[in-house]
Image (cartoon, rainbow, N blue to C red):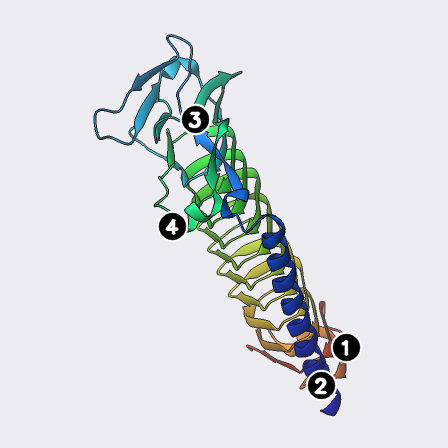
Amino acid sequence: MKRKQRFFKLSAIVGCILLGAGILLCGAGFVAMGCDLDAFIYPRVEMSAQAEEGQVSTETPGPGDDWAQAEFAPQENISAIEVQASLGRVTVCGDPDLAAPMVRYSPKGYQLEIQENTLVISSLDQSEKSWKWYQLLHLHEPSKEYDLTVSVPEKLLDSVYVESGMGAIHVSDLEAANVTVQGDMGDVTLDNVAASESLTVTQSMGRVTVENCQGGDLTLENDMGDTELSSGSFTEGEITASAGSVGVAGSTFTTLTVENDMGDVNLSATQVSEAVSCAVNMGSIGLDQLASPAITLDADSGNVTGTIAGRQEDYQITVETDLGDSNLQDQLGEGSHLLQVTTNMGNISLDFAE
């Protein structure tokens, strides 16, 4: 107990020192720039639609309107979508009433092109104009919205790629062989997406929410923010987080690997037909009716608690804990299933549902 108290006390002291050092460095940098907020700038985006004659019809905004619209012809046979946005909310969604993609966007800022059956939508950077960083926080003047909405027919696409530097991303109600989403700063939400080969989400800072999605391989990477997956169905699943909680609920996999550096991991009503592995460096692991014939749980500094579907006698159990209590003991019998639980500093409390 005393070792635990010393560990947490030392961690708190180190954290305070690092926080103070960070504040001092930020202040020094601000002074070095002459205390000028304008020294911190982001590129400003101008928006315009460009397309060859016959490929797209555009509806320009009227007086007071803050949007434009582009509709593509079905004969263009667009089979892939690629979006590269700098700033603003990006929405890509399926629409059963469409025969070809339609793009709705704020004025003055996106280039639209068709490249080998791929609709490419990218921001136009104008270096002579810039955003002050504090305008994004509404400290100077309200920032304008640079939202983009791409509506696609309900048909199988080859690929969908969405990238945004700053802003939320929402992808829903579509089907593609490969779906890739990359966000830097802003929440990412996927809902009712079918990716027959792969679904990949990479996030730097923000929440990642994946609901009612299915497909082949699933890869979720989040550097800073919570990650939630519910009602999913995939073959191989790989979820990696650096700082933030991870939750998986009501989902099925062939194999599942979850790794988290700092934050809790919760697996609820999840079925993994072959093997599941969960490793947490600083945080706890919680289970609720986890079902799998091969389960590996490793919490370096945190507890492992919850329920496992099935009977205890069906498992060969290996338990190891350095500083903590466990309600399970090693069990090497004739069971065909495997359960391995390891903690360095934390308790183990696992029950079986049957």
The disc at residue 4 is 2
Disc 3 residue type (three-letter): Tyr
For marks 1 and 4 on the same chain, the one whose residue lies earlier in the sequence: 4
For marks 4 and 3 on the same chain, the one whose residue lies earlier in the sequence: 3
Give the total of numbered labels: 4
The residue identified by callout 1 is 333
Residue placed most toward the observer, 39 or 259: 39
Measured in 3D between alpha carbons, the distance from the residue under mark 3 to the one under mark 2, in whole angstroms, is 55 Å
The disc at residue 138 is 4
Measured in 3D between alpha carbons, the distance from the residue under mark 2 to the one under mark 1, in whole angstroms, is 35 Å
Characterize the local packing of mark 4: few (<14), some (14-19) or many (20 or more) Cα atoms within 10 angstroms: few
For marks 3 and 1 on the same chain, the one whose residue lies earlier in the sequence: 3
Disc 2 residue type (three-letter): Lys
Percent x, y of residue 157? 48, 28
The answer to which image quadrant residue 302 occupies is: bottom right
Q: Is residue 154 visible?
A: yes
Percent x, y of residue 324? 71, 85
SS class, disc 4: loop
Measured in 3D between alpha carbons, the distance from the residue under mark 4 to the one under mark 3, in whole angstroms, is 23 Å
SS class, disc 2: helix
What residue is rendered at 31% in x and 26% in y?
68
Mark 2 or 1: in front is: 2
Residue placed most toward the observer, 78 or 233: 78
The disc at residue 110 is 3
For marks 4 and 2 on the same chain, the one whose residue lies earlier in the sequence: 2
Percent x, y of residue 89? 41, 41
